[in-house]
Amino acid sequence: MRILFLGDVGVLRGAPSGGAWPPPISGDASTRIVLNWELPIGEVSTRYKPMQLAAATGAVQAIAGWSGVVASLTNNHALDAGADGLLATASALREAGAEVFGFLQRDNAASRAWSWERPEGRLCVLPWTTAETSPIPGSLQGSGPILWPGLEAASQEVKRAKVGHEWVVAYIHWDIELFHSPSPQARLAARGLAAAGADLIIGHHPHVVRGRESMGGADVFYSLGNYYFDNLPADPRGIARHQVARCRESIGVLATFQRGQAPVIEVVSFFQERGLPPRRDPRQRGVKRMRRASAVFAGQSDAAYASWYGSALVRFQKYEYRFCFRLLSLSGAAWLRLIRWRLARLLRRPAGAGRGGR
């Protein structure tokens, strides 16, 4: 039995090129594709956070031609179209042939985890989304993604799942976006889950590929990146941005499971050309990014890593984020809009209100 784990799939406007994408892997009854379905179907109704997104009805057609899809709805956008949107998304995915897990309906926890049993053994995937990614409005409590309960409680869930399964996989929506390294807290959580018996720990949400690390016999992939993510809507100034190349490269974790053995792992690179479905990447950009991002783990104590992380994050936010993810995401038309907007603000500024003005 084998599973290809993918990262974030965010389809806003329907399937690019107008139909189902080519599947990322060919398979039979012994193959599954697990992915994070990021955006709910419906309309954003109640605003409860700055960035809320909802997908068009035809979004699920992107994966309608795939076999063996298993979609998690545990992420920070799960409730962007309300509880009704969450349920509509689960229904649409099922109609497209996918299994769905990782969400709560009021008074019903049946869709929490995903289990799969074959002659080779029995496997469980436990999904969580951490607090920094998923503010849940009080009016929607009782529906939504599976919230991270804290390391102690999550470790107990892993131990309970391990009783009835040969393998347990943690599939987690976590940590800050776009930075290439995991927080010290994420590494601590991964170590605790591995100690509790998790065989594989896979992260998503940062929208970029992160490093790989081995902890207590478990393989940890801190972020698989975006398998696919649409360009976001224009901001209130009318300035639209493209997904930069770093947000269009991803990795897939192809895990093969055989009773009595640890998972055998192969890492696969994908790339999303603008306006086209994702495809295998012969240039291996995702794998190369993962290897570079993994180098920082070698030979560092937890304290040394925490110190390095704090400094690196400040540098990233001050320089790399502004250049790589803001400036480089602008199209030519967006540059013109931004220049006009800045000029208009300058012309409206009262005399003496510039730098040094009193």
Image: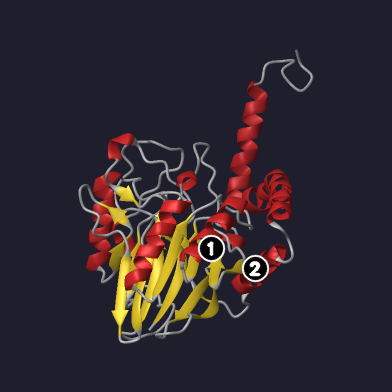
Identify which residue, 122 or 67, lies in the foreground. Answer: 122
Q: Is residue 150 above or below residue 111?
A: above
Q: Horizontal and vertical percent for residue 58? A: 30, 61
Q: Secondary structure at mark 2?
A: helix
The amino acid at mark 1 is Gly
In this rendering, is residue 179 above or below 345? Answer: below
Q: Is residue 37 visible?
A: no
Q: Which mark is residue 172?
A: none
Relative vertical location of residue 181 with respect to residue 257 in this rendering, above or below: above
Q: Which residue is labeled 1 in the image?
A: 225
The answer, for residue 70, to whether it is visible in the render is: yes
Query: Sequence-wise, which precedes: disc 1 or disc 2?
Result: 1
Query: x, y (%) of residue 357?
Result: 76, 16
Task: Work out which quarter of the rendered image holds the C terminus and state it.
Answer: top right
Image quadrant assignment for residue 298 = bottom right
Rendered image quadrant of residue 74: bottom left
Residue 356 vs residue 188: left or right? right
Query: Residue sitting at 46 percent across and 84 percent down?
Result: 261
**Residue 50 horizontal side relative to residue 109, left or right:** right
Please tell me how crowded label 1 is: few (under 14), some (14-19), or many (20+) other residues with Cα within 10 Å: many
Q: Secondary structure at mark 1?
A: loop
At label 2, which amino acid type do we have?
Answer: Arg
* Quadrant where the image shows the N terminus: bottom left
Q: Position of residue 181 (x, y in %)?
A: 64, 57
The image position of residue 272, as x and y in percent, is 52, 68
Q: Which residue is mark 2?
A: 289
Name the side, left or right, on which 31 lies relative to 92.
right
Near-viewer residue (174 or 341): 174
Q: How many marks?
A: 2
Q: Residue furthest top?
A: 358
* Dots 1, 2 in contact, CB < 8 A: yes
Give the residue at x 41% y 86%: 258
